[in-house]
Image: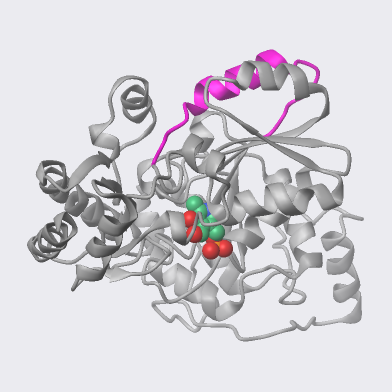
Amino acid sequence: MTSGRHVHPETSSISEGYDPSLSVMAVRPPIYPVSTYCFATAQQAAHHFEVALGKVAAVPGERESLIYARLNHPNAEMFEDALRSVERGAAACAAFTSGMSAIVTVVLTLAKPGKKVLYQRPVYGGTDHFFRQMLPEWNIDAIAVAEGEWQEALAEHGPNLAFVYVETPANPTLQMIDLGSLRAEIDRAVTDRHVPMVVDNTFLGPVFQSPLEHGADAVVYSATKFLGGHSDLVAGAVTTRDPELVARFKTMRAFFGTICEPFTAWMLQRSMATLWLRMTKQSKNASKLVPLLVKHPAVLRVHYPSLFEGEQARIFQKQCRAPGSMIAIELRGGREAAFRFLDALKRVLIAVSLGGVESLACHPRTTTASEMSDDDLRVSGVTDGLVRISIGVEYWRDLAEDLSQALDAAAG
Ligand SMILES: Cc1ncc(COP(=O)(O)O)c(C=O)c1O
């Protein structure tokens, strides 16, 4: 289904994974709302099962057969090919029903009872909840590591370590982690085997950041966000350098039943065609709005990668191709000012989630991060006055007008 020739991601995001000759020469892919696929003969069915179960090798040149839609289906395959083609360093990809099902599937593939997981906070609230509240029930310990304490943590937990998990930029404060340095630190601490590093790249996506080129083994996405890009679907994805690793995730996915269903996979593939356009415009919009936010007297601090200083600025320069469209602002006057700001917004909608064509804003402390303890909130920099804004593709001056009047309202 793939062209095999290397083309720029702006091209492959539109065409990779789809062969019109397999679908009555339709220019764009159809949807296959099909649960099961038939075989020409009983012998062929038996052969494809043996291949799927790894009992015999596929005949050279033979395509993996479609069997049953919980295992695989054309729309998932086409989206996976498109995402793989734009993720630098990726050899394989798997599509999931949500970002969380991708994360849970990856975690339970890599970690077994008695093992440990190290991760750096902040991470998305759902991930944090799963790590801290639920993994211990499987006798897997997820230990949060504070910035600058990796060496110590790796030395202590290295022998039992299943994998390392980080989110960069992190939700909601955009704090960044130097992936290359962390990879080197892991390899220095654990020398008898390779410890996988899993990176949540939801905020910058394959357009602006390529974790696999900085030592990550698996990249996870909430495809609900920029990959889908229209706030009209829930999905997830994982890319890897090693096809064997994705094969393991897909085996687990088949039993969890967490494959993205055909209609959603079709919508995702359609969205891939505009991923570059959308993310580039969103990032440009955000960059134009940031000076206005910085200057407003109601704003104490703006978290945005191009404003970073010191070590965070160094990581941004080294690892990212653009600052993206997520902004966090800290308002003077804490929660009251944050709520006044949100309530005054006319065009930007108050909603969790992010990465869609429309601009959204939320108050993490009382929504997405509301389950974090006071101590974690402090360490993660999630203050009462913090508002997270996802900038869309609207005309930036309309957004500027809306944000300015809402900041005036926040100032009281
Ligand atoms: C950074 C990040 N990772 C993962 C997730 C979970 O994704 P989903 O909601 O698609 O399950 C989210 C959701 O907000 C997120 O922001």
Q: Give the residue drawn at x 45%, y 80%.
A: 25
Q: Looking at the figure, which quarter contains the C terminus?
A: bottom left
Question: Residue 198 occupies which quadrant of the picture?
Answer: top right
Pinpoint residue 185: horizontal percent, then vertical percent.
61, 17
In the displayed structure, would residue 219 be above or below residue 197? Answer: below
Pinpoint residue 151: horizontal percent, then vertical percent.
63, 16
Can residue 80 be spotted in the picture? no
Residue interval drawn in magenta? 174-196
Question: Residue 101 occupies which quadrant of the picture?
Answer: bottom right
Q: Left of 128 or right of it: where is 223?
A: left
In the displayed structure, would residue 160 be above or below residue 198? Answer: above
Q: Left of 346 or right of it: where is 358?
A: right
- What colour scheme was applied to this rendering of the protein? one colour
- 144 or 365, which is in the foreground? 365
Can residue 388 be spotted in the picture? yes
Q: Left of 381 or right of it: where is 149?
A: right
Pinpoint residue 175: horizontal percent, then vertical percent.
41, 36
